[in-house]
Amino acid sequence: MADYKEKYRRALKELDESEQKATDSIQALYQVLMSILKGVKGHHKAIDKAINSLPRNTPNGEGAPVEALSRVRDLVISYFDKDDLRSAITTLDILLENLKMSDVLGDDVEILQKDAAKIRTPNELKAFTRKVVNLIVGALFDNSGPSIKASLNGLKGDLTRQLGSLEALDAGLAESIKVAGLHKDIERIANLSDLSTFHKETFDVLGNGIVNKNELIVEFSGLVETVIHKLAELSSDLRQAGAEEADELKDRWRLTELMGGQVKTLQESVLQADNLALLKTLLTKRLAEFSQTVSEFTEVERCRVGEAEGYAFSVANKLKKMELQVQELKLSLIQAHKEALVDVLTGVANRRAFDERIRLEYERWKRNAEPLVLAVLDIDRFKKINDTYGHSVGDKVLCTISQLINKQVRESDFFGRIGGEEFAVIFTGSDLDSGLKRLEQFRKSVEDCKFGYQGKRLTITMSVGCAEFAPGDTVSDVYGRADQALYKAKSLGRNQCLSERAI
Ligand SMILES: Nc1nc2c(ncn2[C@@H]2O[C@H](COP(=O)(O)OP(=O)(O)OP(=O)(O)O)[C@@H](O)[C@H]2O)c(=O)[nH]1
């Protein structure tokens, strides 16, 4: 359509140019004629008057003043009838010389000049003068010079072909062309003026419609392109946003389908609409529907994003709370573990801590074969203390002795209460003799400790038995030997430390 329109406009332009050329030629010829008539002036008053009444230029859009020129022609002819032959021929020579300047008349004038030389009688002069005048006037009134004619025929051919293309392209236009009878109008074009009239009329009626419809189609194509572009952009955005949720995917597919459907409907509307008003109405309606679809989708998306943000916020809050709870639980677990390993009464390690530690040291001993000594400590005659001073005094004694020994035990060693009045020490990296030496210090410190009760000094002692891990030993084996040594110490009078060697 656009190509056709362009061709049509080009043809019109060429036609206008040709018309302009023709107008220019007429103007030039008229000027030539005027200068010739100037030369004719001064021979007869009536001729001078007729020449003076001619306009200086061809009046705009009206062509040459035919009647006025015809009067001049008749006067000149009648003048030459009366005047002498020589003067007339001289005048004609001047005239022909001037006419040679014209591209259109050049060849014909040369032939006439040859004929002029043969004039012998007034009648010959009269006939000759008629030829000259007819040549000039004919050129003035016949726009269809050879080049203009060819150009005109070419344009007529173009026009016919283009009308045919238009008819094939659009049924509505074919009907308009038929009704307007444009093909017949083309055939009737005989000169530039006819063609110009034809163009003006047809272009006003038909061309205007084409231009309007074209503009609308161009607008519509732009719109469709924009929509498709927007659709592609949107799809790309959606993909980037990572539409993982089923609902989101569903909505987005629905939107894509709706938009695609609406674009298709728009295209069909353009093809089907047989008049511009209907096309505009349809387009406006479809665009409103389209805009509505996009708005609805945007709203759904906005709500979804709002919900997702709210959900993310609450999840983040929950996570934060859970983190705090986990932290608290961790701390309480550590605390519980610590507490689980601590003897509530004395504050030193308890039986469970001892079990864990002796297992650990045993495994280490098996790997490194570093000396490892286990000692069992037992307060002497503790039952008597309880019985004599009361259970609470017994508790205090337990606490005091626990703290007293605990502060003497090295960081790397272990001390804990493993039963009622029974304690254990693990010496790591120390052999039996070194362990025994340390145990003796502990025993002595307990013996030397001043326990006071109601102003009286209580002497507390303890007995100790120890054993060293030897190849092939289990924890139970070593514990058994240490316990036997303790039993021996008790049986030998208490308040003493014995190793397994004493068993
Ligand atoms: N006050 C107090 N007494 C306890 C505790 N645990 C155990 N005892 C007491 O410790 C005493 C241990 O007595 P026995 O096993 O007979 O031994 P002993 O009196 O120390 O005599 P020997 O070990 O032979 O020197 C018991 O009377 C228990 O009731 C405790 O936590 N607090």
Image (tube, helix red, strand yellow):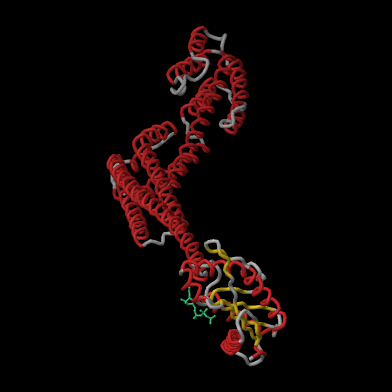
Q: Which quadrant of the figure contains the C terminus?
A: bottom right
252 up-or-down from 346: above or below: above
The one of 283 and 212 positioned closer to us in this rendering:
283
Horizontally, residue 427 falls left or right of residue 231, namely: right
Instruction: Give me the residue at 48% from left, 69% from top.
Output: 389
**Residue 216's quadrant in the figure?**
top left
Instruction: Give me the residue at 72% from left, 80% from top.
Output: 434
How many numbered circles are shown? 0
Q: Position of residue 103 (x, y in %)?
A: 59, 31
Q: Residue furthest front?
A: 456
Q: Position of residue 222 (x, y in %)?
A: 42, 45
Q: Position of residue 322 (x, y in %)?
A: 43, 59
Q: Residue furthest bottom?
A: 472
Residue 488 visible, this orientation? yes
Horizontally, residue 65 falls left or right of residue 304, namely: right
The one of 170 and 309 positioned closer to us in this rendering:
309
Q: Position of residue 182 (x, y in %)?
A: 34, 41
Residue 168 visible, this orientation? no
The one of 265 and 407 positioned closer to us in this rendering:
407
Horizontally, residue 331 falls left or right of residue 289, namely: right
436 up-or-down from 297: above or below: below
